[in-house]
Amino acid sequence: MAAETLHGDAPDAQRETLVRADLARHLKRGEPLRILGNGLVAIAVAALMRDVVPLPWVLAWLALTLGHAAFNAWAAWRVWHRPTRTDAAARRLSVVTRMEATNGLLWMAAELMWLPASDYVHRGLVMVLLSGLGAGVMHSLSAHLPALYAFSLPIVLGFFIAGCFAQGTYFLVALALLLIWLAVNLNFARHMNRTLRESLANHHRAQALAVDLQVQRDRAVELGQARSRFLAAASHDLRQPVHALSLFIGALQLEPRGDKASAIMGHVDGALAALGSLFDALLDISKLDAGLVQPDWQAVPLLPLLHRLARDQVALASAKGLQFELQAHSDAWVRSDPVLLERVLRNLLANALRYTDRGRVGLHLRVRRGRAEIQVADTGRGIPRAQRREVFQEFVQLGGPGGGREQGMGLGLSIVARLVGLLALQLRLRSQPGRGTVVGLLLPLLPTPAVPPEPARAPASGMVQSGLQTGDVVLVVDDGDGVRLAMQELLASWGCEVFAAACIDTLMPQLMTLRAAPRLLLCDYRLQGGANGLDTIAQLRDAFNDDLAAVLITGDTAPDRLKEATASGLPLLHKPVTPALLRQAIDRALSMPQPGIALGPG
């Protein structure tokens, strides 16, 4: 069967056209059996009636009937291997109707010749043969009722006319039985026709829905890819000046200044940190899209984690005039990723603080029935029931468009939802508008270890002494003019000799005056002319015949580029970079370069 489908919600007329084509194919498949059965019954009837009707008449009728069957067979053979086109289906059904009408008239002629002059035995045999032929044809032609009527009605009419010239009540009884038989079989044929049409229509309707589903799925994929491309492009272009601004502020903070200037610098630094947190949220989404975030499963003690979170949140809550409470009295160990679990809790706490105007925010630990539940509770604005699923979607803000500039972009809870799925956590949410919200995370408990493992060493502060020494040569490759200038200012304030260029071609001539080999290379990932930082680092290492320590810096959040940068194994920073984070990355690169990617700075 030729595969034809409807695209979209096609009108009934178009669906009827496709159904008509399917019916034409159905009739074509049954045509060989109809032709063969009609020919065999014709031969049998002719053999029975050869002693009742003059032989020349019998032979003439048989020749016409078999000739008609042969013509039908030839016509069917011509179109057997051709696909039935939708636009030709109506014509094909019309041809079948004409063929069956001719066949019915031939059988009507046979009845008029034989029935009046035959005896009861011959009449009975002929009636049995015609009933069998009619039943077979009726089953085959039920797909197209006009063809069935064109075949059946001449036979009934012939029987009626023959009965008008016959003697006795035989024909009246036989005609009544024939009419009952015809009515029952035609009613059955109509039911079969309706069932077949509905089945074919449902088939095309299902195909149309499947096509629509695929179109919608492809559209959703395209929209997702377009969103990722937009976020990557916008994030990269916006990160460049913010990155340069962060470095300029870092260099400026090392200069002496008065109290008022220090206060202003503090405000600028706070605004820059807020802007950086927005970029970090976009970066988190891109990393999750790229599949770069995978849990590092281990046994995690909850008490140290919760106490550390509480220490960080107390000052933030106090600055907003809120109370912060920690209720965690029983030790509990769970199997999770400590970094990702902490990120989930920090996002929930940040959201609770943002939408609580008075009262308190709490962090609670409940242990019961083999599970630990970490609750983040607040007395804030609450979430209406209709929005409880919606708030975990991307770019949805709880307070709506007029809720204030502090809301951010509405990515925090969407990141929570994706990390909860990644960590296989069970999330519970209870909320009442105007009364507050409680978000609970359920984790299965682990047995408390007999000897707790040694706690991990805290990460080094951003202001520790860098591994760079005064006079070290540092190479900077970045196609942003402002970024290069900011890097030069900051590194020069650290006592380094800096050579900066937009690409390797403009950097190499500067290196002809080098008195000592460079100690460090800071390279942007995406450079002008389609070049990338990985190739640039490889070329410079080859030029100096040395595994030059390098740090890869990128403002690109496209998932495929994030995968490439991560696979390089180089220390990777995401713009905007603060001077403290830059110092940490330089220390790692100068000691033991390791690929390290977290969900975002801080």
Image (cartoon, helix red, strand yellow):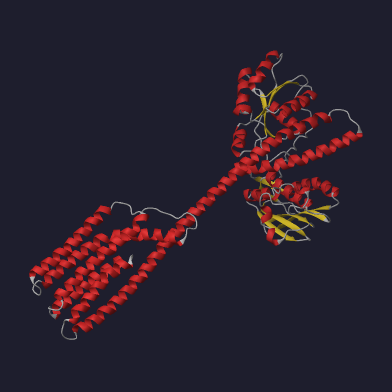
Q: Nearer the viewer, residue 42 or 428?
A: 42
Where is residue 29 drawn, in percent x and y? 29, 59
Q: Residue at x 60, y 36 (%)?
A: 563
Above or below, comparing residue 156 to residue 214 in the picture: below
Where is residue 402 drawn, in percent x and y? 76, 53
Is residue 292 at least partly visible in the picture?
Answer: no
Q: Quadrant of residue 181?
A: bottom left
Q: Nearer the viewer, residue 238 or 183?
A: 183
Determine whether, in the image, residue 399 is placed left or right of residue 106: right
Q: Residue at x 20, y 78 (%)?
A: 161
Where is residue 27 drawn, in percent x and y? 30, 61
Where is residue 192 drawn, in percent x and y? 35, 69
Is residue 289 at least partly visible in the picture?
Answer: yes
Above or below, comparing residue 322 to residue 456 in the picture: below
Q: Quadrant of residue 366?
A: bottom right
- Extreme right residue here? 259
Q: Quadrant of residue 154?
A: bottom left
Quarter placement of the C terminus:
top right
Quarter placement of the N terminus:
bottom left
